[in-house]
């Protein structure tokens, strides 16, 4: 696993903002291929998802609620 690639992907997602980050988490949990995760291996993508969830848990649901899929 390449932690530098994971860190770069996390940085890219973080720059997208809270709502987009939660949307990406939802998409990844649904098994969808989402940039920048599409540039990572399956294990790296899983690691990125876990780190995103950890970071977003600090903010709580009030910060920006998880969008409901339409």
Image: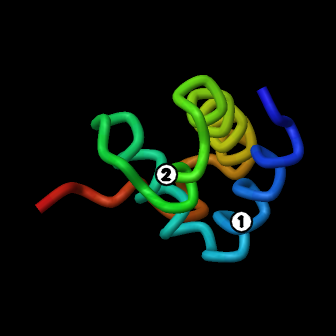
Give percent across and percent down for residue 46.
57, 28
The residue lying at 67 percent from left, 29 percent from top is 47
Quadrant where the C terminus lies?
Answer: bottom left
Residue 46 versus residue 25: which sits nearer the camera? 46
**Residue 33, how many percent across, how many down?**
36, 49
Q: Quadrant of the N terminus?
A: top right
On screen, residue 21 versus residue 47, left or right, reads: left
User: In the image, residue 69 lies at what x, y percent?
Assistant: 19, 56
Report x, y in % for residue 59: 70, 52
Q: How many marks?
A: 2
Between 19 and 35, the residue placed more toward the observer is 35
**Could you tell me how far apart the alpha carbons at marks 1 and 2 are, in whole angstroms?**
16 Å
Q: Residues within 10 Å of mark 2 (few under 14, many from 20)?
A: few
* Residue under pointer 2: 38
| Residue drawn at (46%, 55%) of the image | 24
**In which image quadrant can residue 34 be found?**
bottom left
Tag of residue 14: 1
Q: Residue at x 30, y 45 (%)?
A: 32
Residue that extends furthest to the left in the rendered view of this protein: 70
Tell me the element at label 1: helix
């Amino acid at each position: 696993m390449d932690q530098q690639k994971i860190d770069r992907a996390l940085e890219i997602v973080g720059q997208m903002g809270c709502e987009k980050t939660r949307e990406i988490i939802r998409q990844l949990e649904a098994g969808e291929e989402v940039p920048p995760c599409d540039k990572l291996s399956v294990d790296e993508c899983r690691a990125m998802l876990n780190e995103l969830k950890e970071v977003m848990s600090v903010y709580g649901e009030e910060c920006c609620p998880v969008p409901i899929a339409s």
